[in-house]
Amino acid sequence: MILLLAFSLFAILSLNVLLWRWLKVSACKTQKFPPGPPRWPILGNLLQLGPLPHRDMARLCDKYGSLVYLRLGNVDAITTNDPDTIREILFRQDDVFSSRPKTLAAVHLAYGCGDVALAPMGPHWKRMRRICMEHLLTTKRLESFTAQRAET
């Protein structure tokens, strides 16, 4: 009886996981991603990156085009080696790409993502950055800590 119950529980959980993965994959197929190498089911493209991942990513950009979609574990990533695309991302679209993800650790450890290090990009982060630059990171304040920095 216990064996039958354990088997049925395992079957239900497996079905739920497969259904969830199928729905997630079908939802991803409706989105248009840049081309990229084929992926393994759980690891994604992690096995294709060696000890020098920046060279491997540059090689993938040479093979698949200026934008390459990679799946690194369960994280989606897009890489490029085109200077014009990098300029577009870093200078013209920086407010779109510079925000930080709101993770569970950031919420619990950083007062609901309220500190300057883990706050998402927005008016609150800009105020916190201005306060840090005006009061904490001035030349006079940094010079006052030279003795402590020299000890370490």
Image: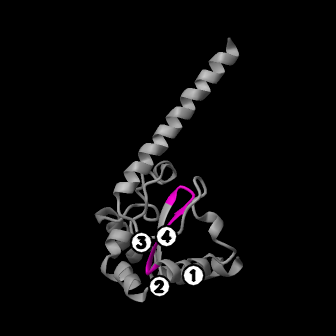
The one of 6 and 101 positioned closer to us in this rendering: 6
From the image, tell me which residue sits under label 4.
36
- Estimate the spatial distance between the alpha carbons at disc 4 and disc 3, rounded to whole Å: 41 Å
Looking at marks 3 and 1 on the same chain, the residue that comes earlier in the sequence is marked by: 1
**Which residue type carries mark 3?**
Cys
The residue lying at 37 percent from left, 66 percent from top is: 128
**Which residue type carries mark 4?**
Gly
Mark 2 or 4: the one toward you: 4
**Residue 152 to residue 100: above or below:** below
SS assignment at label 2: helix
Mark 3 or 1: the one toward you: 1
Looking at marks 2 and 4 on the same chain, the residue that comes earlier in the sequence is marked by: 4
From the image, tell me which residue sits under label 1.
59
From the image, tell me which residue sits under label 2.
139
Q: Are marks 3 and 2 in contact (CB under 8 Å)?
A: no
Q: Is residue 3 left or right of residue 74?
A: right
Residue at the far top: name it: 1
- Magenta stretch: give its range: 65-75
The residue lying at 49 percent from left, 79 percent from top is: 141
The one of 144 and 88 positioned closer to us in this rendering: 88
Q: Quadrant of the C terminus?
A: bottom right
Mark 4 or 3: the one toward you: 4
SS assignment at label 1: helix
The one of 116 and 85 positioned closer to us in this rendering: 85
